[in-house]
Image (cartoon, rainbow, N blue to C red):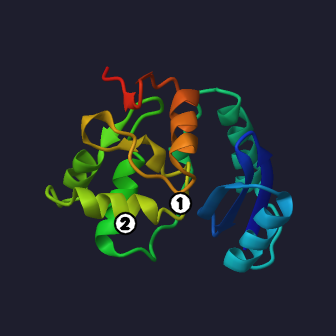
C-alpha cells in the first residue's frame, strides 16, 4: 500500500492508495507525527507512488485556492455499506465551490427521506476532500457537522469561494 503524508495550511494530511485507487485521506492532524501514526495504523507501511505524487501536487494547488477537481481521482469505497457507498459517490458530483443539502444527497443515493443517514455517511467518509463531504450542508444553509469541526468546514467552503451570511451559507 502506498502512503502520502503532507503538510497543509489546515494541518497535516495523510492518504493511502492501492491498485490505482485512493483508499483513505484524512487531514487536520496537528503534527506530522500524529499524521504518520494515524496513517500507519490505518494503512500499514508504504511509500509514495505516482498517483499519490500527483495528488500531493493537486492538494497543494487546492489549498492555495486553485479550483482543483479532486473528485477526478479514483477512490475505493467498496468496503462501505450500499447506501453509504451511494452517498459517497453522489457527493463526488458536487462541483467545486457549490453546496448541496443532506436531503439532496439522500435523494441522489436512493433514499429521499434519509437526510440523517446521508449525514452519517458523510461523517464516516474515508476519503475526505476526494469525496467532498464539506460541500454538504444542512437545510436552510446551516453548515452542519464535519469531522474537523465547523470552523474547518467553513474554511474549506470559503477557500472554494462559497459565501456566508452570518452562520449560513448564502444561496446562489
Quadrant in the picture for the C terminus: top left
Residue 54 image label? none
Residue 101 in the image, given as x and y percentages of width and height: 29, 43
Identify the secondary structure beneath mark 1.
Answer: loop
Q: Vertically, is 25 above or below 53?
A: below
**Which residue, as the protein is rendered here, is positioned at the far front?**
166
Q: Which residue is mark 2?
A: 85
Name which quarter of the figure residue 50 lies in: bottom right
Task: Give whichever of 167, 68 is nearer the camera.
Answer: 167
Residue 166: quadrant of the picture = top left
Whole-percent x and y of residue 27? Answer: 66, 54
Q: Residue at x 19, y 59 (%)?
A: 110
Give residue 121's position: percent from left, percent from top.
37, 63
Query: In which quarter of the view is residue 57 placed?
Result: top right
**Badge 2: residue crowd in 10 Å (few <14, some 14–19, many ≥20):** some
Say left or right for 142 vs 152. Answer: left
Q: Residues within 10 Å of mark 1 (few under 14, many from 20)?
A: many
Depicted 130 relative to depicted 143: above or below: below
In the image, which disc is placed on residue 75?
A: 1
Quick one: which residue is furthest to the left in this view? 113
Amino acid at each position: 500500500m502506498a502512503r502520502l503524508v503532507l503538510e497543509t495550511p489546515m494541518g497535516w494530511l495523510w492518504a493511502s492508495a492501492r491498485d490505482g485507487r485512493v483508499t483513505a485521506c484524512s487531514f487536520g492532524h496537528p503534527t506530522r507525527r500524529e499524521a504518520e501514526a494515524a496513517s500507519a495504523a490505518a494503512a500499514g507501511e508504504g511509500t509514495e507512488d505516482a498517483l499519490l505524487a500527483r495528488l500531493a501536487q493537486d492538494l497543494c494547488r487546492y489549498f492555495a485556492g486553485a479550483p482543483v477537481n479532486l473528485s477526478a481521482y479514483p477512490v475505493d469505497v467498496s468496503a462501505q455499506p450500499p447506501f453509504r457507498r451511494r452517498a459517497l459517490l453522489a457527493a463526488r458530483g458536487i462541483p467545486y465551490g457549490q453546496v448541496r443539502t443532506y436531503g439532496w444527497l439522500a435523494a441522489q443515493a436512493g433514499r429521499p427521506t434519509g437526510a440523517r443517514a446521508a449525514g452519517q455517511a458523510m461523517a464516516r467518509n474515508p476519503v475526505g476532500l476526494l469525496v467532498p463531504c464539506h460541500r454538504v450542508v444542512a437545510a436552510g444553509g446551516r453548515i452542519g457537522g464535519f469531522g474537523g469541526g465547523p470552523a474547518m468546514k467553513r474554511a474549506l467552503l470559503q477557500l472554494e469561494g462559497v459565501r456566508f451570511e452570518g452562520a449560513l451559507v448564502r444561496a446562489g
